[in-house]
Amino acid sequence: MIVAGSIYLTAGIVLMLLRFTPLKDKILERLEFKVKTQEHFSRRDLLLLAFIVLFGSFLAPLSFMFGLDKTTAVNASLLLNTETLFTVLIALLIFKEKASRRSILGILLILIGAAVISTGNFREVELSKGILGNILIILAGLSWAIDNNLSKLLSVKRDLLLVTSLKGLFGGSALLILASLIGIPFYIPLQSFPYILTVGAFSLGFSIVLFLFALREIGAMKTGAIFSTSSLIGALFAFLVLGESFTAIKAFFGVLMLFGVYLLSLE
């Protein structure tokens, strides 16, 4: 919890500091595309941001961390794909995003590929084990899915750096305060700080900015589905950099995922 809170807080601080440099306008200009953006924040937007922080930066990582402790790694990898499933369902059923049969097929191919690649070996999946942990992982997926769809409403704001930095600042602070209240000691080894800075700024901070841009341009349903290709990218990275195995099965389902993305791009 301390590490997660520190990463979120670091992302918020880095992006907030970036807003006071000449890079801010250059970045925001690059993010101006087809959808017309809004400059100002209303009270409704601030309330919306509060719910986004609650679900995406607090409840989701909290549920995930406790769930990970109470289930197997394989179960967690599989069940974390529920984030994409819930994101698509909420976008379709509640926010009424439009989807053709081709889009639905593309999303299904991506989901199937993500499930296979992230799990690695279905023979090791035992959902009857660690039921509480499994439920917490699913709740984390649901919380992130709610965050994704609510964030779509805020993605029309021009200053995506501000939106992301506030998510990080408030979410990270909440996690660290909770850790303090339940007696978790605040200790991070000095050698870990460069990793926290890198992960916070890039893997979380800038990735959320780009994620919000995608939400603005193509909607929560497509963005959530395409984001699942991170499992394929992770597997390729592990193969090329860490020397881990990349089986023919993973390659096949990776191609399946890419074909799914291609189908979505045709819309």
Image (cartoon, grey):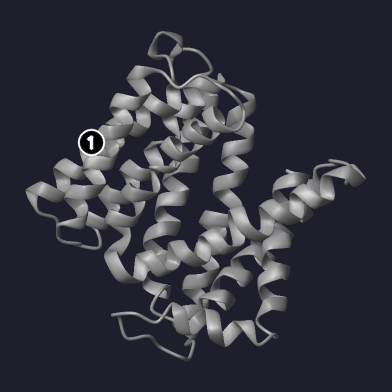
Query: Looking at the rendering, which quadrant does residue 22 occupy?
Result: bottom right
Q: Secondary structure at mark 1?
A: helix
The residue depicted at 63 percent of the width and 36 percent of the height is 65
The residue depicted at 38 percent of the width and 79 percent of the height is 156
Where is residue 197? Give x, y as percent.
Answer: 75, 56
Asked whether, in this view, residue 57 is left or right of residue 121, the answer is: right
Asked if residue 187 shows in the view, the reply is no
Count every numbered label the image shows and give the total. 1
Q: Which residue carries the number 1 mark?
A: 109
Up the image or down, 17 lies above or below 73; here it is below
The residue depicted at 73 percent of the width and 61 percent of the height is 10
Query: Looking at the rendering, which quadrant does residue 119 occupy?
Result: top left
The quarter of the image holding the C terminus is bottom left
Where is residue 235? Give x, y as percent.
Answer: 48, 31
The residue depicted at 57 percent of the width and 63 percent of the height is 206
Up the image or down, 93 lies above or below 67; here it is below
**Nearest the eye: 8 or 265:** 265
Determine the residue located farthest toward the left in the rendered image: 101
Determine the residue located farthest toward the bottom in the rendered image: 40
Where is residue 262? Give x, y as percent.
Answer: 21, 49
Asked whether, in this view, residue 9 is left or right of residue 81, the answer is: right
Up the image or down, 221 lies above or below 127; here it is below
Asked if residue 23 shows in the view, the reply is yes
Q: Amino acid at mark 1?
A: Leu
